[in-house]
Image (spheres, rainbow, N blue to C red):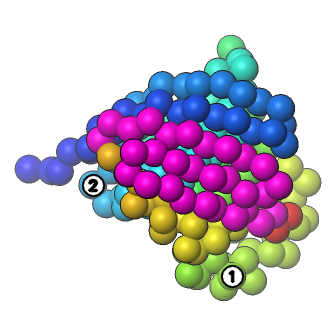
Amino acid sequence: MALRATIYKADLHIADTDRGYYASHSVTIARHPSETEERMMIRLLAYALFADADDSLGFTKGLSETDEPDLWRKDLTGAILQWIEIGLPDERRVLKACGRSSDVVVLAYGRNAALWWQGVRNGLERARNARAYVLDVDGSAALGRLAEKKMALNINIQDASAWISSEAGEATVKIQKLV
């Protein structure tokens, strides 16, 4: 019998002074059996970083579906407006996404992010509609420790940093733009 996804519920209270976006969102997120809590929490952070008033950003099947990103924004016709990948995706995957969406974002994290960037840098710098960011290792690990089945996260974003607090503790994640 296959393992099932674990369901988490999160109330996100976002204060993004860089974009002038202040809102609260209640989201339900499924954690794939092979996904770490750190990766799932980075998906929640990505939601906070790119959420907007039209509320069209959504989670996909993620690891369960190879042809979908971790998050995407679609218009009313179903066209993909924004494609958001978490982790260290293959260069071909990102470039294929650039053909399917007008805005592709990669949030890289982990100890191998610098090595990954060396391998994909040339290809991603040539893509006009791709952006890549790297999250600091200690910050993303601390973020993973905040995971609870039901959580309320206060997320303050300013000057390439995200401060996240909850009843479980707090984390500061530095976000460096690569391209």
Q: What element carries label 1?
A: helix
Residue at 17% from the left image edge and 51% from the top image edge: 3
Q: Is the magenta stretch mostly helix, strand or loop?
A: strand
The image shows residue 138 at horizontal and vertical percentages of 55, 74
Number of disc labels: 2
* Relative to 93, 151 lies left or right: left
Q: Is mark 2 on a helix, strand or loop?
A: loop
Picture coordinates of residue 159, whole percent (x, y): 82, 55
Q: Which residue is drawn at 68% across and 14% down?
A: 76
Residue tagged 1: 114
Q: Mark 2 points at which residue?
A: 33
Residue 19, above or below 78: below
Q: In which quarter of the image is the C terminus?
A: bottom right
Residue 54 found in image quarter: top right
- Name the residue: 69% across, 82% down: 114
Residue 162 on the magenta segment: yes
Residue 121 belongs to magenta span: no
Please state which amino acid type lies under the numbered disc 1: Ala
Residue 118 found in image quarter: bottom right
Graded by Cα atoms within 10 Å as few (under 14), some (14 to 19) or many (20 or more), the crowding at tag 2 reads: few
Q: Give the range drawn in magenta.
A: 149-177
Mark 2 in CB contact with mark 1 (< 8 angstroms): no
Q: In this view, does 66 lie above or below 53?
A: below
